[in-house]
């Protein structure tokens, strides 16, 4: 439904099918994946790299030259910025990723920890607006429950990084790039997942892909096989390193992350990863946050739901919208998506 397919009849039949009726469920799945897109669908959301590049506002010829040129020499933007400053920003990106992950872990459940509940809890803890890690109240107020990671991720208890799948993926991305560089392919990523990722330490799309790989589903189709999470944030959270290794070269960063993202995701799940890599790359050299954000928007397919959503947030900023009002507007516009979807998370 979210990606424009008319599944209303299947939805009703699915609701009436017993959970243990595997034959009927399999038949409904086959019917589901062969449905047609609605004729009034307003978006253009390709999956192949060439089609995605053609759909971006950035000049496709420049994009296609970007990666080869990046391999030959450092970008002019990096030279102008200064290698020491770029290195400092990359370190800041890594530390920020660790800090941000620890910051969010105690309340990592978007169904329970809504913005209203977060604010209520922080006000009870006299910690709103938040300027540090989440405090753990003792005793916890009725109606509030922190993630089990709280003993190592709340204020005064952070001594390094708690392990987390988001951070695992950054380390794995670096490992892959050290070995394969720009020759990285989805098959190489798949082999690394099978060898190095414990099944119970991955979730949603990545877990679905591991299952399909173990059932010999071809790498080219594994991302769209029994994978209802293919537009969620898995590829987005794996994208940072591709921006750090191509500072000031957002086109090259966006193309590099495609080999990873396309294994497990489709459409906006891929675009979100390419956008994030471009954003991080731009942030390594940009003069301001606004400059980095505006550059990154050139690396999102213009006819996609992600482009529409991100440009909508940019419009809120230009109109002087407050942070609180922006959050409420985003939730009103995109609240029909899961809290783990790439579009609302990117916003």
Image (tube, rainbow, N blue to C red):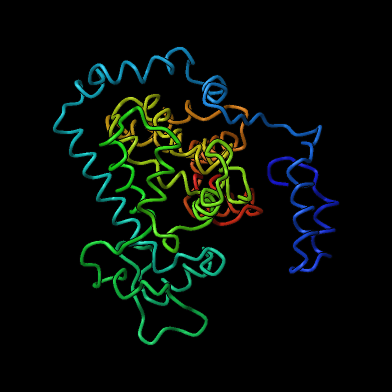
Task: Give the answer, above or below, for where 252 lies relative to 85.
Answer: above
Locate residue 303, reporting x and y percent. 62, 28
Locate residue 132, reporting x and y percent. 29, 63
Position of 211 with respect to 71 (left or right) is: right
Task: Give the answer, above or below, for where 148 lies relative to 301.
Answer: below
What is the tally of numbered marks visible in this picture?
Answer: 0
The answer to which of 329 and 303 lies nearer the viewer is 303
The answer to which of 157 and 217 lies nearer the viewer is 217
Position of 280 with respect to 338 (left or right) is: left
The residue positioned farthest toward the top in the image shown: 61
Residue 295 in sight in this render: yes
Residue in view at x 75 percent, y 55 percent: 26
Residue in view at x 73 percent, y 47 percent: 1
Position of 36 with respect to 66 (left or right) is: right
Locate residue 9, reporting x and y percent. 86, 51
The residue positioned farthest toward the front in the image shown: 216
Task: Give the answer, above or below, for where 50 lies relative to 227.
Answer: above
Residue 344 in sight in this render: no
Locate residue 60, reporting x and y percent. 49, 16
Task: Give the answer, above or below, for where 289 lies relative to 29.
Answer: above
The residue positioned farthest toward the left in the image shown: 84
Residue in view at x 30 percent, y 26 percent: 248
């Amino acid at each position: 439904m979210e990606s424009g397919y008319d599944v209303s009849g299947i939805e009703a039949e699915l609701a009436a099918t017993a959970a243990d009726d595997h034959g009927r469920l399999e038949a409904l799945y086959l019917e589901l994946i062969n449905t047609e897109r609605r004729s009034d669908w307003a978006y253009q959301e390709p999956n192949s790299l060439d089609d995605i590049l053609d759909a971006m506002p950035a000049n496709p010829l420049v994009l296609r030259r970007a990666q080869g040129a990046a391999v030959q020499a450092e970008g002019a933007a990096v030279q102008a910025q200064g290698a020491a400053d770029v290195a400092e920003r990359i370190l800041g990106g890594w530390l920020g990723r660790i800090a941000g992950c620890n910051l969010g872990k105690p309340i990592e459940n978007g169904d329970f920890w809504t913005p209203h509940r977060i604010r209520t809890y922080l006000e009870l803890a006299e910690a709103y607006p938040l300027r540090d890690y989440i405090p753990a109240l003792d005793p916890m107020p009725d109606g509030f429950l922190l993630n089990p990671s709280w003993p190592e991720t709340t204020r005064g208890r952070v001594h390094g990084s708690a392990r987390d799948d988001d951070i695992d993926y950054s380390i794995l991305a670096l490992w892959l790039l050290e070995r394969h560089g720009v020759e990285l392919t989805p098959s190489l990523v798949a082999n690394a997942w099978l060898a190095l990722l414990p099944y119970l330490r991955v979730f949603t799309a990545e877990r679905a892909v591991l299952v399909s790989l173990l059932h010999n589903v071809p790498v080219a189709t594994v991302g769209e096989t029994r994978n209802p999470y293919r537009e969620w944030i898995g590829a987005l959270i794996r994208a940072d390193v591709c921006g750090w290794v191509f500072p000031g070269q957002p086109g090259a960063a966006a193309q590099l992350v495609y080999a990873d993202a396309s294994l497990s995701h489709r459409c906006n799940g891929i675009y979100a990863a390419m956008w994030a890599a471009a954003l991080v790359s731009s942030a390594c050299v940009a003069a301001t946050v606004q400059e980095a954000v505006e550059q990154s928007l050139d690396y999102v397919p213009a006819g996609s739901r992600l482009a529409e959503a991100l440009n909508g947030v940019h419009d809120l900023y230009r109109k002087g919208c407050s942070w609180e009002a922006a959050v409420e507007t985003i939730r009103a516009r995109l609240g029909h998506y899961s809290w783990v979807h790439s579009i609302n998370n990117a916003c």
